[in-house]
Image (spheres, rainbow, N blue to C red):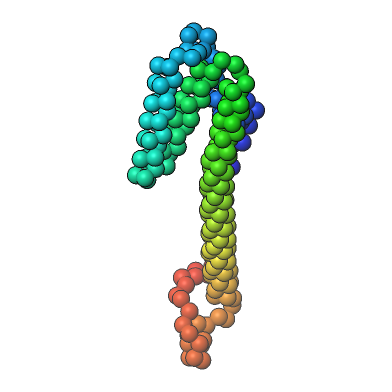
Amino acid sequence: MNEPIIARHWLVAAAPKAAPAIATTTVLALARIWNANGAEHSVGNAALMTVLAAGAAAGGASLARAGEPVLAATGYAVSGSLALAGVAAYSHGLSLPLLLWALATVLAYCFAARHWRQDRRGTLDHERHVSERREEHAHIERVETIRATTQIEVARTGAAYAEQLAQALVTRAALPGFDPTALERSGLPALPSLDITKEH
């Protein structure tokens, strides 16, 4: 009934917390690599990233209206990533890309914190439900154990009483001068017939 306790490595526990920063840092690094390979001041590349970012944002908005919050959030995240990559790749210096990276990382952590809070609430509700069910089953098990023990004790007591009664009847029937018909004439209930052979 006891579940094994599994201790997770601290890296496994910390990986989801680092995911937003890793994602935005990866986008910034790739954009700066693209910048070094000729994207700086390229109007065509800037227009492409603008169109892609606007398309992703429009897709996220339409998915939000359609009642798909997870897909809508994904669309907005893609739009923000494309916008960050476009600005970081198009810009000459590092100050604007770093500023956008910091803002994107903060926003990613804000959205992730909301998701983590909901996930933690769901986990706590599940653990509370499992604990209540476990306590209920343990209570039922204790009650059934007490009931079974009581029935066993009652059966043992009844068997011991029957054995003692039979022994008392045999002992009384073996007494000298015992007359079962005299008991019946006096109004007492008839005793079971016992075949007792007496050796004289």
> Which residue does the image show at 48% across and 9% down from the upper left?
38
Q: Hey, which quadrant is residue 61 in on the image? A: top left
Q: Nearer the viewer, residue 106 or 22?
A: 106
The residue furthest bottom is 186
Residue 76's place in the image compared with 173, above or below, is above
Residue 109: x and y, percent? 58, 35
> Which residue does the image show at 57% across and 27% down from the upper left?
100
Q: Hey, which quadrant is residue 142 in on the image? A: bottom right
- Residue 123 visible in the current orientation: no
Residue 129: x and y, percent? 53, 52
Q: Hey, which quadrant is residue 55 in on the image? A: top left
Residue 48's place in the image compared with 117, above or below, is above
Quadrant holding the C terminus: bottom right
Quadrant holding the N terminus: top right
Exactly how many numbered labels are in the figure?
0
Residue 43: x and y, percent? 43, 17
Residue 19's place in the image compared with 200, above or below, is above
- Residue 43 visible in the current orientation: yes
Residue 65: x and y, percent? 36, 45
Q: Is residue 36 left or right of residue 79?
A: right
Q: Nearer the viewer, residue 171 or 17?
A: 17
Q: Nearer the viewer, residue 168 or 15?
A: 15
Q: Is residue 70 left or right of residue 108?
A: left
The residue furthest right is 10
Residue 41's place in the image compared with 62, above or below, is above
> Which residue does the image show at 56% across and 15% down from the upper left?
92
> Which residue does the image show at 55% across and 80% down from the upper left?
178
